[in-house]
Image (cartoon, grey):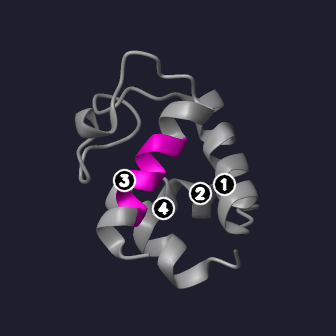
Amino acid sequence: MGTPELKYQLKEQIIKFLNLISVTPEDIKDDEPLFGEGLGLDSIDSLELIVLMDREYGIKITDPKEGRKILVDINTMVDYIEKNRTK
Protein backbone atom coordinates (compact mmCIF):
# COMPACT_ATOMS: atom_id res chain seq x y z
CA MET A 1 0.00 0.00 0.00
CA GLY A 2 1.38 3.37 -1.00
CA THR A 3 1.43 6.50 1.13
CA PRO A 4 -1.67 8.15 -0.46
CA GLU A 5 -3.71 4.97 0.05
CA LEU A 6 -2.49 4.64 3.64
CA LYS A 7 -3.42 8.27 4.35
CA TYR A 8 -6.95 7.72 3.02
CA GLN A 9 -7.31 4.45 4.95
CA LEU A 10 -6.13 6.12 8.17
CA LYS A 11 -8.61 8.96 7.71
CA GLU A 12 -11.42 6.43 7.26
CA GLN A 13 -10.30 4.56 10.37
CA ILE A 14 -10.15 7.75 12.45
CA ILE A 15 -13.67 8.65 11.35
CA LYS A 16 -14.94 5.17 12.20
CA PHE A 17 -13.07 4.75 15.52
CA LEU A 18 -14.02 8.22 16.78
CA ASN A 19 -17.56 8.10 15.36
CA LEU A 20 -17.12 11.39 13.49
CA ILE A 21 -20.45 11.15 11.69
CA SER A 22 -20.34 14.47 9.83
CA VAL A 23 -16.69 14.17 8.71
CA THR A 24 -15.46 12.63 5.45
CA PRO A 25 -11.87 11.64 4.61
CA GLU A 26 -11.77 14.60 2.21
CA ASP A 27 -12.53 16.94 5.15
CA ILE A 28 -9.31 15.95 6.92
CA LYS A 29 -6.25 17.67 5.50
CA ASP A 30 -2.96 15.75 5.69
CA ASP A 31 -1.18 18.57 7.52
CA GLU A 32 -4.11 19.78 9.65
CA PRO A 33 -3.59 19.39 13.40
CA LEU A 34 -5.76 16.62 14.79
CA PHE A 35 -6.10 18.31 18.17
CA GLY A 36 -7.12 21.84 19.13
CA GLU A 37 -8.07 24.18 16.32
CA GLY A 38 -7.58 21.60 13.55
CA LEU A 39 -9.89 18.60 13.63
CA GLY A 40 -10.75 19.44 17.24
CA LEU A 41 -9.97 16.12 18.90
CA ASP A 42 -9.45 15.89 22.66
CA SER A 43 -7.49 13.75 25.13
CA ILE A 44 -10.07 10.95 25.11
CA ASP A 45 -9.79 10.83 21.32
CA SER A 46 -6.02 10.47 21.68
CA LEU A 47 -6.56 7.28 23.69
CA GLU A 48 -8.79 5.96 20.92
CA LEU A 49 -6.11 6.76 18.34
CA ILE A 50 -3.54 4.86 20.42
CA VAL A 51 -5.88 1.84 20.43
CA LEU A 52 -6.35 2.24 16.65
CA MET A 53 -2.57 2.26 16.09
CA ASP A 54 -2.19 -0.93 18.13
CA ARG A 55 -5.19 -2.78 16.70
CA GLU A 56 -4.74 -1.86 13.05
CA TYR A 57 -0.95 -1.54 12.69
CA GLY A 58 0.57 -3.41 15.65
CA ILE A 59 2.11 -0.20 16.99
CA LYS A 60 2.12 0.16 20.76
CA ILE A 61 2.45 3.70 22.08
CA THR A 62 3.12 3.57 25.80
CA ASP A 63 4.89 6.89 26.38
CA PRO A 64 2.54 9.92 26.35
CA LYS A 65 5.39 12.16 25.15
CA GLU A 66 5.95 9.85 22.19
CA GLY A 67 2.21 9.85 21.50
CA ARG A 68 2.14 13.66 21.34
CA LYS A 69 4.90 13.56 18.71
CA ILE A 70 3.13 10.89 16.63
CA LEU A 71 -0.52 12.00 16.81
CA VAL A 72 0.09 15.47 15.38
CA ASP A 73 -1.51 15.16 11.95
CA ILE A 74 -2.12 12.58 9.21
CA ASN A 75 1.34 13.09 7.68
CA THR A 76 3.10 12.43 10.99
CA MET A 77 0.97 9.37 11.78
CA VAL A 78 1.46 7.83 8.33
CA ASP A 79 5.21 8.43 8.45
CA TYR A 80 5.37 6.67 11.82
CA ILE A 81 3.16 3.80 10.63
CA GLU A 82 5.30 3.22 7.53
CA LYS A 83 8.45 2.99 9.64
CA ASN A 84 7.06 0.95 12.56
CA ARG A 85 4.07 -1.15 11.52
CA THR A 86 4.04 -4.84 12.35
CA LYS A 87 0.72 -5.70 10.65
Residue at the disc numbered 4 = 69
Q: Which corner quadrant holds the N terminus?
A: bottom left
Sequence-first tag of 1 and 3 = 3
Q: CA distance from mark 4 to mark 2?
A: 5 Å
Rendering quarter of residue 87: bottom right
Label 2 – label 1 distance at C-alpha: 5 Å
User: Please, which residue is most extreme toward the top here?
Assistant: 22
- Disc 4 marks a residue whose amino acid type is Lys
Residue to which mark 3 is pinned: 8
Judged from the image, the secondary structure of the residue bearing numbered disc 2 is helix
- The amino acid type, in three-letter code, at marker 1 is Pro
State the extent of the magenta-drawn residues as a range.
6-13
Residue annotated with mark 1: 64
Q: Amino acid at mark 2?
A: Gly
Quarter of the image where one finds residue 27: top left
Q: Is residue 58 above or below residue 45?
A: below
Question: Any magenta on residue 12?
Answer: yes
Instruction: Judge left or right: residue 22 versus residue 62.
Output: left
Asked whether the beta carbons under mark 4 and mark 1 sit within 8 Å of each other, the answer is no
Helix, strand or loop at mark 3: helix
Q: Which residue is mark 2?
A: 67
Nearest-to-viewer mark from 1 and 3? 3
Tell me the kind of residue under disc 3.
Answer: Tyr
The spot of residue 64 in percent (x, y) is 66, 54
Label located before the other in sequence (2 or 3): 3
* Distance from the alpha carbon under mark 3 to that under mark 4: 21 Å
